[in-house]
Amino acid sequence: MTVETPSRVASYAYGVTRSDIAPSVGAGVAGADVRLVRHRGLAALVSDVPSEGVRARRRDLLAHSDVLQTAFAAGTVLPLRFGSVFVDDEAVADELLGARHDALEHLLQELEGAAELSVRASYVEQAVLAETVREDARVARLRAASRNVELGEAVAAALAAKRDRDTAAIVAAVEPFARDLVIEELRGPYEVMRASFLVDQGQLSAFDRAIEAVARERAGVVVVRCVGPLPPHSFVRLGGN
Amino acid sequence: MAIATQGTASNYLQRAPSPSGLADVLELILDKGLVIDVYLRVSVIGIELITIDARVVIASIDTYLRFAEAVNRLDLTQTEAAGLAELRGNGSGEKAKGALEGAKDAITGNGKRDKSRSN
């Protein structure tokens, strides 16, 4: 006779919120139902995953984000990085909510009523290069002389200077409406800036108006993408972590 | 003028209330968020993450040449820009060149044959 061994499950954690908030969150990673694990006023958003792990697919990544986004609509949420799995719910209560109770509580207080806005600005290649040729006599001269390495170097230098000016302009325009900001690394030669801003809910529309205005000034040359309000993914650092 | 308006006036701000695709989501949940010592970390397989530090990339001869090529191809007076952008965007510059060389070869071949026939 064989004993049926139920497939063992572990607890996948999405984020931490307050235990008095009851977000109605649907399916999470691997399609499992999301529940709350509560401990001393805190609650973790959790769902079952096979204890041997899951192969994360596109839909799992989107599910992690969706769960946090949905919970965020109900109240303050501290997002965990994708892929955090605990042995079981008890471990979530002890190792996450218990062991870091005060730090998490402090972060929840600090981030109450605030949202993250993710801002990325990129150059329209043809437009910014044309602008560079028009503005920079040296670039124009080297272009005419077909001196390619020097030309490319001059273009890179001109773009770097332009990038600094455009970044400064965007930051200056929206910073008055933000509580905090993180400037991130660029990932391509035509990116202008990547940054995340922490904005109070009450300042969201002012922030929006400011970013619209500053983006309009560079219409045609710079495209700005602004995503949010998001849970504060970029602003949840725990001390000593 | 066409260059200046390409990409443009109505398109200067993309405003999304929530992450609207994998690209938005990846940078939020893989690089950010609380990191806790956990029992297991789900690995992300099959999704290639291309992270390029632009500061490194920009300071290379290769990039200089690419910038130069892009600037040389600019037609500052008229409307070729959109076509060029399309070519580059598809990464089909190579393919186009290959096809052109092929055409040149064929013409040369014909030329030789004509020549030998006329002899």
Image (cartoon, rainbow, N blue to C red):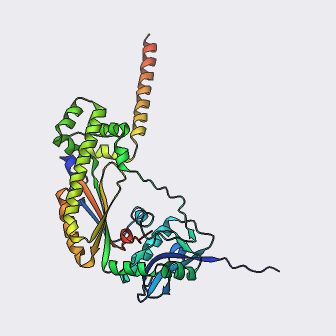
Q: In this rendering, does residue B43 appear at all? A: yes
Which residue lies at the image location 56% right of the left edge and 82% below the top edge? A89
Residue at the right extreme, as displayed: A1
Left or right: A16 with respect to B1? Answer: right
Left or right: B73 with respect to A231? Answer: left
Total tally of numbered discs in the picture = 0
Q: In this rendering, does residue B9 appear at all? A: no
Q: Quadrant of residue A51?
A: bottom right
Q: Quadrant of residue A139?
A: top left
Q: Quadrant of residue A234?
A: bottom left
Residue A220: horizontal and vertical position, in percent? 21, 54
Q: What is the quadrant of the N terminus of chain A in the image?
A: bottom right
Which residue lies at the image location 41% right of the left edge and 78% below the top edge? A103
Residue A206: horizontal and vertical position, in percent? 20, 73
Residue A230: horizontal and vertical position, in percent? 35, 72
Residue at the top extreme, as displayed: B119
Which residue lies at the image location 28% right of the left edge and 33% below the top edge? A150
Left or right: B33 with respect to A156? Answer: right
Q: What is the quadrant of the C terminus of chain A in the image?
A: bottom left
Residue A154: horizontal and vertical position, in percent? 25, 38
Which residue lies at the image location 22% right of the left edge and 60% below the top edge? A170
Residue at the bottom extreme, as displayed: A20
The residue nearer to you, when weighing A34 against B31, is B31
